[in-house]
């Protein structure tokens, strides 16, 4: 069962960013907003997949290797397909005026993964910047940067997959609630005291 949520009070936060859009007022609007959020998260998943392909082939990209073997071609194909997936998900995701209303307690894992991915990205940039300062440890910094980028890619991908799973479960719960509301309305109409007998059951004068 879903829980009642204020349509305007809740403001969702992601690190320094705030989503101040109001909660969708109806179940159908919540479902539509959840679908749009899933499409947005699909783009995040493709971004994580693209980063993963880059991280696994980072050394060759840095050295500008002219030759491409089967593994490098496979990673390049994944990177290209992931880039196309990002553009396709952005094209499919419509602008939305509401949040889907999913409770914060359902999104704790996604928030943790997103925060960890952001920290790993900061770690990646820090290792890359340190490579220009501490040239004596350049090889070690290259390894650190590669590891940080790999961790960032995995966390980004896991965060997107977890967010999609949360929205799917939320949509199923909303559908169940919608069915219960419809059933209650049907029962209420059948048992309404204002309803009278059928025409053939009415007494004749």
Image (spheres, rainbow, N blue to C red):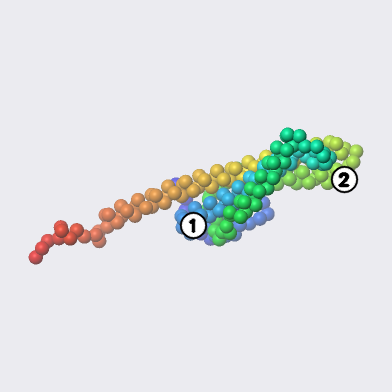
Q: Quadrant of residue 196?
A: bottom left
* Residue position for label 1: 29
Q: Which residue occupies 63% across, 41% down?
A: 158
* Residue position for label 2: 132
The picture places residue 78, in percent across and down from the top left corner, at: 68, 41
Q: Nearer the viewer, residue 113 or 50?
A: 50
Query: Which quarter of the rendered picture does the C terminus lie within?
Result: bottom left
Along the horizontal axis of the image, is 176 left or right of 86? left
Q: Do the CB atoms of the residues marked 2 and 1 lie less than 8 Å apart?
A: no
Along the horizontal axis of the image, is 68 left or right of 109? right
Label 2: few (<14), some (14–19) or many (≥20) C-alpha neighbours in 10 Å: few
The picture places residue 165, in percent across and down from the top left corner, at: 55, 43
Q: Nearer the viewer, residue 100 or 106?
A: 100
Q: Is residue 75 visible?
A: yes
Label 2, label 1: how far apart the Cα atoms are = 51 Å
Tag 2, which secondary structure? loop
How many numbered badges does the structure rendering display? Answer: 2
The picture places residue 141, in percent across and down from the top left corner, at: 83, 39
Name, please, the residue furthest toward the right.
136
Label 1: few (<14), some (14–19) or many (≥20) C-alpha neighbours in 10 Å: some
Along the horizontal axis of the image, is 159 left or right of 7? right
Q: Is residue 53 visible?
A: no
Q: Which residue occupies 25% across, 61% down?
A: 194
Tag 1, which secondary structure? helix
Q: Which residue occupies 73% across, 45% down?
A: 121
Name, please, the residue furthest toward the left.
205
The picture places residue 93, in percent across and down from the top left corner, at: 58, 54
Label whose residue precedes the other's in the sequence (2 or 1)? 1
Q: Which residue occupies 24% across, 59% down?
A: 195
Name, please, the residue furthest toward the bottom.
205
Q: Quadrant of residue 79?
A: top right
């Amino acid at each position: 069962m879903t829980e009642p949520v204020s349509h305007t009070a809740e403001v969702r936060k992601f690190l320094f960013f705030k989503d101040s859009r109001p909660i969708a007022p109806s179940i159908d609007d919540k479902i539509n907003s959840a679908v749009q959020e899933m499409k947005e998260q699909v783009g995040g998943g493709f971004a994580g997949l693209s980063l993963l392909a880059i991280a696994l082939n980072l050394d060759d990209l840095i050295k500008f290797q002219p030759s491409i073997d089967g593994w490098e071609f496979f990673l390049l194909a994944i990177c290209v397909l992931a880039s196309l997936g990002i553009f396709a998900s952005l094209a499919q995701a419509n602008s939305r005026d509401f949040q889907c209303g999913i409770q914060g307690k359902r999104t704790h894992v996604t928030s943790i993964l997103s925060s960890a991915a952001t920290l790993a990205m900061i770690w990646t940039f820090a290792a890359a910047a340190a490579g220009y300062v501490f040239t004596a440890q350049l090889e070690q910094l290259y390894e650190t940067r590669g590891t940080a980028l790999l961790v960032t890619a995995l966390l980004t991908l896991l965060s997107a997959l977890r967010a999609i799973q949360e929205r799917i479960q939320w949509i199923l719960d909303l559908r169940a609630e919608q069915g219960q509301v419809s059933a209650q309305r049907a029962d209420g109409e059948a048992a309404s005291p204002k309803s009278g007998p059928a025409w053939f059951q009415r007494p004749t004068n």
